[in-house]
Amino acid sequence: MSRRLVVLATSFPRREGDHAGRFVRDLSRGLIERGHEIHHLVPEAPGAPASERLPEGATVERFPFASAAWQRELVYGRGIGANLERRPWLVAAVPRLVRAMERALEAALEARPDAAILSHWVYPAGLVGARLSRRMGRRHVSVAHGGGLQLLANWPILRRRLAPWARGTDGALFVSEDLRARARAALPARLALPPSLVAPMGVDLDLFAPRGDRAATRRRLGVSEEAFLVAAAGRLVRLKGFDLAIEALRETSPGAVLVVAGRGPEEARLRRLAAKRGVEARLVGHLDPPELRALMESADLLVAPSRPGRRGRTEGAPVAVAEALAVGTPVVAARSGGIPDLVREGENGRLFAPDDASGFGRILAALRAAPQELERLRRGCAASRPERGYDRAAAAVETLLAGR
C-alpha cells in the first residue's frame, strides 16, 4: 500500500555528488519506486536551496534553525554525534535545532493529514518523530544508524531519552545487528524494543556497477597495472582507522599504493605517517560517486580498518563497504560494529581484530601473494551483489509501516 511519507533527517545531499546523507536519498528512491510519495525535511545548509524537487520526484524542504554560523557546525560534517564529541560546546545549539525540527515536522504533517513519519538517526530526528507521532496520531518508523543511537546509549545522562523514542516508534530499522543489541541493552528492563528489522542502507546498483575501466582509472591515477592498489573511502577521522592501513601496508611495500578518498582533520597526520613509514599513500580528497566507483573498481581491495571510538562508539554499516562490494571489490575490514553484517569472512573479504595493525598487515600480504584468492573473493562479491541495493532497506521500511 502506497503512503505519503515525511522523512526527517539531519543530513542530506546539498548538491549533486555530495556524500552527506546520500543513503537517505537512496532509501527514498527505493520507497518512491515502491509507489510512496516522499517529502524530505532537513536542516538548512549554506549554498543549498531552501526547497527543491528532485528528479526522482521527492521534494526537499530545508528548514532554518541557526541564528549564528557556529550553530550550523552541529549538523553535517562528521554527523551530530561525532560533532558533539569533538566540540562539546555545540550542545548549546541542540535545543534550537530540536525546536526547529518540531515546528517543521508539525507544519509538514498538518499539510499532509494522511502522512506517516520516517526519521533517520535516533537522535534527534527519531526522538522528534516519536514525540510528534504520539501527539498527532501518525505512524512513525525510525531508522537507527550508528551516531544518534550510540550518542544516547553511551552517555548515561542522555540514555533516559531512549525510552520516549521507543514509546513513540511503531517500527525501528537498524542498520546492523550490533546496533539493535546496543539499543536493547540500553533501554530500561521494563520497556521492550519497538518491532524491528535489520537491513544496512543500500546503494544505487546502477551507479555502483562494474564498468570494466580498471586500466583506464589506474592510468589516470598514475598507478601501474602491476601495483597492489588498496583503496579506502570516508572521513579522515580517527574512528575510520586509516592510520592502521598505512601501518599494515608496511608489510607489502614496495609496490603497494594506498589511495584514500575523503577529507578531514586527520589528513596532515596521515601524510606525515605515510612518509615516515615509507608507504606510498595518496590522499585524493572528495570524489563524486562516479569517480569513487572508478577508484573502487580499479583497486585490488578496499580497506575499512574502523576502530572503536570514545565510550565504545563504533560504525554502523559503512556505505563505502557496501559500495565496494557492489562494484565487485573485496573488502578487508576490522571486525567492528556492523561491518561483519556486510563483510563475510572468506566469502567477499577478510576480517581482523580492531586496532590489530600486524594482523591486518598479514592479511594484506597474504592476499597480494595469492591473486587466485583475490579472484575467488571477487566472485563472492558478485554473488552477493543483489543484496547491496537500496530496495532491501526500502522493503523493510514498508513492512514496518504496514505493521507486519
Image: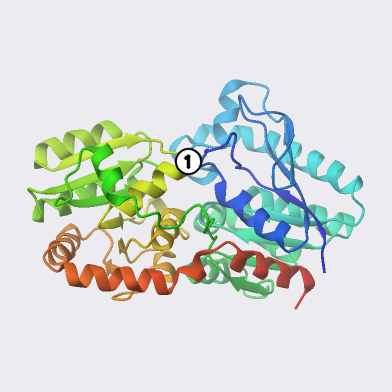
Quadrant where the image shows the C terminus: bottom right
The front one of 51 and 10 is 51
Residue 369 in the image: above or below residue 195: above
Name the spot of residue 42 as percent of width and height, x first.
Answer: 68, 40
Q: Residue at x 35, y 73 (%)?
A: 380
Instruction: State the colouring used for the structure image.
Output: rainbow
Residue 21 found in image quarter: top right
Determine if residue 348 is in view: no
Residue 25 in the image: above or below residue 357: above
Residue designated by label 1: 78
Name the spot of residue 335 as percent of width and height, x first.
Answer: 33, 66
Residue 369 in the image: above or below residue 252: below
Q: Residue at x 51, y 70 (%)?
A: 387
Name the spot of residue 337 as percent of width and height, x first.
Answer: 42, 63
The front one of 396 and 87 is 396
Does residue 68 appear left or right of residue 156 in this picture? right
Determine if residue 341 is in view: yes
Outermost residue, bottom side: 404
SS under mark 1: loop
The front one of 151 and 12 is 12
Quadrant where the image shows the N terminus: bottom right
Q: Residue at x 63, y 49 (%)?
A: 25
| Mark 1 surroundings: few (<14), some (14-19) or many (≥20) residues within 10 A | some
Q: Residue at x 62, y 73 (%)?
A: 197
Name the spot of residue 248 as percent of width and height, x first.
Answer: 16, 54
Residue 3 found in image quarter: bottom right
The front one of 173 and 296 is 296
Amino acid carrying label 1: it is Arg
Outermost residue, top side: 68
